[in-house]
Amino acid sequence: MWKWLFLGFLLHVSWANATDKLSIYVWSNSMPASTIKAFEARCQCRVEQSYYGDNEELLAKLAAGAKGYDLIFPSTFVLPALIAPNKLLALNKSKLPHSKDILPAFLRVPYDNDNTYHQPFMIGVTLLGYNAEKLKAAGVDPSSWAAIFDPEQLKKIKNKVTVLDSSRELFAAALMYLGKDPNSGKQEDLAAASDVIRKAKPYWAAFNNDSYSRQLASGNIWLAMGNSSDLFQARREVKETKRKFQLEFAAQKEGNEWWMDTVAIMKDAPRPDLAHQFIDFLLEGKTAAAQSKASGGISPVSSATPFLDPELSQHPVLNPKPQDFTKWTLLRAYDAKERRLLSRYWTGIKVR
């Protein structure tokens, strides 16, 4: 009899764990397996991940009616497009005790400045990663956006360059290259940026969000516009595999975009309780440090600092001082008219 009771208990536990699921929709390559395994062990649940490569992809899927996600990880400038149509759940701050450790520099960002709907997740910079030997031999200077926009520079490395498949980020970089405000939504400025991109496009190998870091680490690509976190991972791969070149990344003299990916709970989340637990878990010092170490992203949590290894804590791009962010730009949200205008230019670029 005891055997059957014990078997029944095991079946009950197995059934409960099988249905206790947290579903997250997250950036590709941003959530290390160690973070997921540690949370699954703590909550005795299963974490199911789906991936996207760009904010526009996230918004398009949700606009098309995708359901069933508990957590999403939008960048700050798309928060208004989620808050206005009531897509997000207001956070219960009493269930997020570790939010007290968020660095002040990353609180009160535009669009949700009281953190009603989001918490900071990971910070980084959009810049250029490059094969140091190949670019030096070609005479291309990666400290300027000219490296990906100036046809005279690009002729030297044709088909060895990739750029992000993101209209907002690519246009921002082109605007900086032109000496304009990367947040400008004026027609004349977007037209000028579009012209720069059109002239540079024939020299690029691809628009690439997903595999550019692997292409760079393998030596197939010599120069890539990308995120500091992805480029950090690529550089680590080059070192670990002892490839015969150096992979570096650098900020650009015309300016850079700094971005903050956030974590937010969907209004119709099946498990808002688990979602709150996972957010608070991400804000714990050791978890945040492990996340930063695995991804190369900048942690928004003060309690992570003692656990960061020197490669991160001493790097001026991967662990900048708060005042350093004044040199970089946080992208603002475009209004509906600006989004339509940008989309029209972007479509024209992609189809030709």
Image: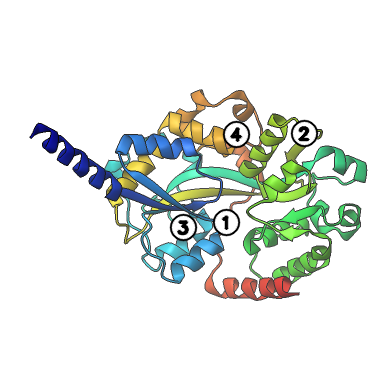
Mark nearest the camera among 4 and 1 is 1
State the separation of the CA atoms marked 3 and 1.
22 Å
* Disc 4 to disc 1, C-alpha distance: 28 Å
Using residue 83 as the reference point, say whether residue 205 is left or right of it: right
Q: Quadrant of residue 64?
A: bottom left
How far is disc 3 from disc 4 in space, using C-alphas? 23 Å
Q: Residues within 10 Å of mark 2 (few under 14, many from 20)?
A: few
* Vertical placement of residue 211 versus 31, above or below: below
Cα distance between the residues tagged 3 and 2: 44 Å
Secondary structure under the numbered disc 2 in the rendered image: loop
Q: Which residue is mark 1?
A: 53
- Disc 3 is placed on an element classified as loop
Amino acid marked by disc 4: Lys
At a point 54% along the width and 69% down the height, the residue shown is: 335
Secondary structure beneath label 1 = loop
* Label 3 sits on residue: 111
Q: Which mark is residue 321?
A: 4
User: Mark 3 near mark 1, Cβ–Cβ under 8 Å?
Assistant: no
Q: Nearer the viewer, mark 3 or mark 2?
A: 2
Question: Given the image, on which type of amino acid does mark 3 rest?
Answer: Tyr
